[in-house]
Image (tube, rainbow, N blue to C red):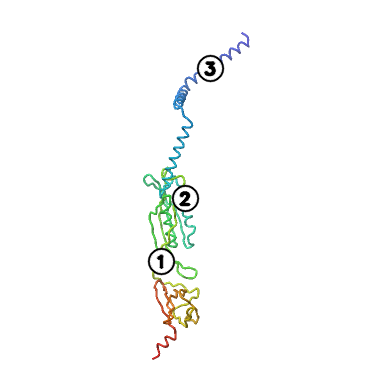
Amino acid sequence: MNRKSKNTLALVGLLLILLCLGGLYIFIFQQGKIKDNQNKLVSLKSSNYNTDQLMAEYNDLLQRAAKLDSVLAQRKFNIPQNLSSISFFNFINKISGNFSSNTQINVEYVDQKRDKEFYYYEYKITGDGDYNNLYQMIYAIEQSKELKKVNSVTLSNFVAAQKDGSPLFLVSFILTVNVYFSDNNRFSPAQLVENNLTASRLYDAFFPLIRNQIPPNLDNLLDVQGAKLLALIPEGAFLSDSKGNTYLLWEGQQVYLGYLTKIDYDHNTVSFILNKGGIIEKTDLTLEKEIVNKKKP
């Protein structure tokens, strides 16, 4: 046998070996996968999906999802999914942006805890400031669309001195706040619309009714203490203070610690209402000549 015939037989033998190996791989190793794919193909053919039908089902599901989202949006509070712990810091910065410069707020992240099927972040808020700024912050936390709850409050009064020396009555506070979230989106709409977080002003419950401190007379107003009524004219009343300074005043005009409330031309008197550290006093001044005439026998 020549060399050419030997090579041909060798190639034929190698080809037979490859065919055998390929057959073994296909019919033994891949037989299970082939059967699975054939079963899936049969199942898909039996379903006979229609594109128009699928689009109709999709639109129907889309409408149902929109209705459910609308219901969630109408609820006063929602519980967001996988909320970041940084979001509460941003929330406090936003609502305190227009607070008085006298108000100082510190926010501290404490821990993450679980409450039944929900989770919540716990924060500690400390600081001091104006009473109504504190009320606005608590109101915004409690009324926020994303559920937040003030867990505890500790308050105390705090007095600071202003540049002019007058007292500034502030409130020191410690709050603990829980911010709730969930691990799914069943309790929150796709688009969040925040509630109205604007609170009406309240009377400062920590402002003392009676105070030892009386603000200084920085505007050089008439000090009724020691003042004299010099004359009454149609335009108002002439008065002088204990230092000899003269003033022309009319009804409703401001004086030191109060207002001129009435000019009585019939009895030649003027009346004042004064607030002396929370104590309200009514003071009357009579024309000097009337006093002299009364002293004559």
Category of crowding for the residue at label 1, using alpha-carbon neighbours closer than 10 angstroms: few (below 14), some (14–19), many (at least 20): some
Q: CA distance from mark 1 to mark 3?
A: 99 Å
Q: Amino acid at mark 2?
A: Ser
Quadrant showing the N terminus: top right
Report which residue position mark 1 lands on.
207
Of the numbered discs 2 and 3, the one sitting upstream in the chain is 3
Mark 1 to mark 2 CA distance (whole Å): 33 Å
Which amino acid type corresponds to the residue marked 3 in the rendered image?
Leu
Label 1 secondary element? loop
Q: Which mark is residue 87?
A: 2
Picture quadrant where residue 210 is located: bottom left
User: Between marks 2 and 3, how big is the CA–CA gap?
Assistant: 65 Å
Secondary structure beneath dot 3 equals helix
Q: Position of residue 219 (x, y in %)?
A: 50, 73
**Residue farthest to the bottom, as pictured:** 297
Q: Earlier in the sequence, mark 1 or mark 2?
A: 2
**In front of the other: 206 or 26:** 206
Label 2 neighbourhood size at 10 Å, few (<14), some (14-19), many (20+)?
Answer: few
Q: Are marks 1 and 2 in contact (CB under 8 Å)?
A: no
The residue singled out by tag 3 in the image is 19
Image spot of residue 14 (x, y percent): 56, 16
Give the residue furthest to the top: 1
Amino acid type at circle 1 is Phe
